[in-house]
Image (spheres, grey):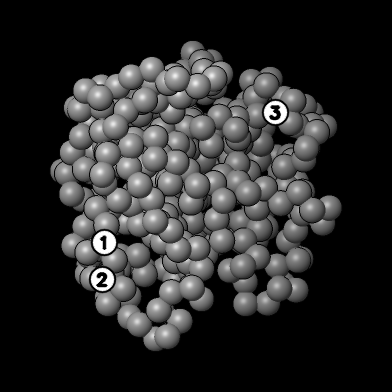
Amino acid sequence: MEFLGSNIISINQFEKDDIESIFKTADSLIPFANRSKLTKVLDGAILSNMFFEPSTRTRISFGSAFNILGGSVRETTEMGSTSLKKGESLYDTSRVLSGYSDIIVMRHPIAGSVEEFAEASRVPVINAGDGDNEHPSQALLDLYTIKKELESRGKTIENARVALIGDLKYGRAVHSLCKILSLYNNISLNLVSPEKLKLPSSSIKELKVSSVALKETDNIQEGISDVDILYVTRIQEERFNDAEEAKKYKGLMSLNEEIYTKNCEPNTVIMHPLPRDSRNDANELDSDLNQNPNLAIYRQTDNGLLIRMSLFTLILGVSDQINDSASDVNWYSNKS
């Protein structure tokens, strides 16, 4: 794809070569993300961070990524603080905000809304999650994490064995991850979920067309053996029409140290898109795994910063200028 000036709406936009370009650029940005180097490559540029659903990691990492590159960030964090509450259309909002910004990141509770917004925008738009549809930057950071974790174990993405666990019906991170994994050869997916939270049939059809080997089960112990990656997700209770219905599935797919040790290969990587629900009735990823060296959830979030920095530099056409304004930081930093 042509990155310059492009919207990032769906994983379907990418080919393998595009993904490798994103990852190569992300690797080059490690000194800046680790705060051992500074750059002002986006000095003067403005990001509008439009989040109409709750977010911690995605919102702050997009904002931090832009700040680290030297740009400024303006934010809206709820629908009620915008003119959308007064009946303004997405079209009008997009036309106006794109006049104030150089790039826009948007999260919205309704599937397809970010694409609609982007069609009216005069600047590039990145989808930070649209309802239960897609979350492309999450899929990119997840794949980047999978690549790095497997390479540290002498393996590659090709031939990866992955278990997707939890709410596969409503989890947009899962939907996007399935799409991106299907670009690679000899992928095996174990789909581990309650019967009523299975991966949508449309996603399963796409995976079969791509020759991904699939296994479906509602038994977590059966689904997590003989895999390289465990990708655990929470129950997306905000997507259910009935809160009581959502409660029925909490805790059904919980992973803890005992289950992990008993059923998994010794170096199986544990991932989660976060937030994990640590309440007693859910607890899909137990805190007794926090000291397990194979727990990669915090490496995931660090990688998210790199991927979002990479997207900004590629879309705004400055990936070859990052080092032109580079300098050392003048404060204490020990993140590397």
Nearer the observer, 133 or 323: 323
324 left or right of 260?
left
Report the amino acid beneath label 2.
Val
Residue in view at x 41 percent, y 79 percent: 84
**Dot label at residue 96:** 2
Q: Secondary structure at mark 2?
A: helix
Res. 148 visible in picture: no
Residue 235 is drawn in which quadrant? Answer: bottom right
Q: Considering the numbered disc 1 on the image, is that residue within a helix, a strand or a loop?
A: helix
Q: Which residue is mark 1?
A: 100
Q: Do residues under tags 3 and 1 come within 8 Å of each other at their CB atoms?
A: no
Residue 78 visible (yes or no) = yes
Q: Mark 1 or mark 3, which is nearer the start of the sequence? A: 1
Residue 11 vs residue 308, the one in the foreground: 308
- Vertical side of 239 occupied by 26: above or below: above
| 315 left or right, relative to 175 | left
